[in-house]
């Protein structure tokens, strides 16, 4: 180890770091910490002001809608008898899921059969189509199609009847073609 001799007075001597920390850095850190706190404070105050304005705006909108809310509450009170009679529940339970029915029509359709017209009414369904078969099994294809639909519970559960209304055979070239009409009557349909 080498001995260092320093003849300078104490205030002019270079300071040595104790444990790797220079105490002069504290003087620089204190103002920096205050500056960071001030910036964070200003940011939070600005954010609070923006949220306050948004809250005031939403309160004003709520106050503007108050007459409509009161009218809606009055309407609910007046229509309490309607809901009490459970007529809404009856309307919902009587609803037919036509999207499921159309999916079943497509899924159960055999090769050689296609639809030419599909019409829906309050009473039910009318389906017109055409079938062609190289083996002269047109009627068998129609019957198989109707049998599949009747066995499909999701399709058939809303129908009272589902029958072949008409079938007309014709020739196109050397092929036999049958034009058919199938009608389905809904269970909950009452003629007026």
Image: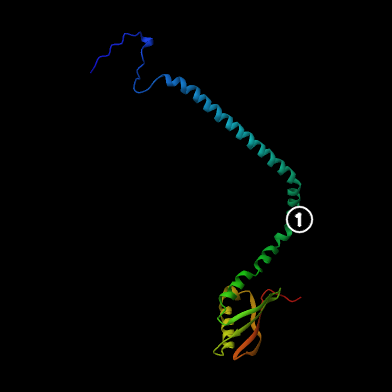
| Quarter placement of the N terminus | top left
Quarter holding residue 127: bottom right
120 or 63: nearer the viewer: 120
| Quarter placement of the C terminus | bottom right
Quarter holding residue 88: bottom right
Task: Residue at 58%, 74% (x, y): give it.
Answer: 104
Mark 1 is surrounded, within 10 Å at the Cα level, by few (under 14), some (14 to 19) or many (20 or more) other residues, namely few
State the image coordinates of residue 12 (x, y, percent, origin top left).
38, 11
State the image coordinates of residue 133 (x, y, percent, origin top left).
57, 87
Task: Residue at 63%, 79% (x, y): give it.
Answer: 115
User: Image height check: is 49 above or below 31?
Assistant: below
State the image coordinates of residue 22 (x, y, percent, origin top left).
39, 20
Coloring scheme used: rainbow
**Residue located beneath label 1 in the image:** 78
State the image coordinates of residue 113 (x, y, percent, origin top left).
59, 81
Task: Residue at 57%, 29% (x, y): give it.
Answer: 41
Task: Residue at 64%, 76% (x, y): give it.
Answer: 159
User: Image height check: is 122 above or below 19?
Assistant: below
48 or 156: nearer the viewer: 48
150 or 192: nearer the viewer: 150
């Amino acid at each position: 180890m080498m001995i260092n001799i320093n003849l300078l007075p104490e205030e002019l001597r270079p300071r040595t770091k104790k444990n790797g920390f220079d105490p002069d850095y504290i003087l620089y850190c204190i103002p920096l910490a205050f500056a960071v706190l001030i910036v964070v404070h200003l940011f939070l105050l600005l954010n609070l002001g923006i949220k306050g304005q948004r809250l005031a705006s939403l309160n004003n909108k709520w106050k503007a809608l108050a007459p409509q809310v009161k009218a809606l509450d009055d309407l609910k009170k007046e229509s309490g008898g309607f809901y009490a009679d459970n007529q809404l529940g009856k309307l919902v339970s009587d609803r037919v899921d036509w999207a499921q029915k159309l999916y079943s029509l497509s899924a159960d359709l055999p090769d050689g059969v296609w639809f030419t017209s599909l019409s829906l009414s309050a009473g039910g369904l009318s389906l017109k189509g055409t079938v062609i078969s190289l083996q002269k099994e047109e009627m068998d294809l129609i019957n198989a199609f109707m049998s599949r639909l009747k066995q499909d519970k999701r399709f058939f559960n809303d129908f009272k009847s589902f029958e072949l209304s008409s079938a007309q055979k014709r020739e196109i070239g050397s092929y036999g073609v049958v034009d058919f009409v199938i009608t389905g009557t809904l269970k909950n349909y009452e003629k007026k």
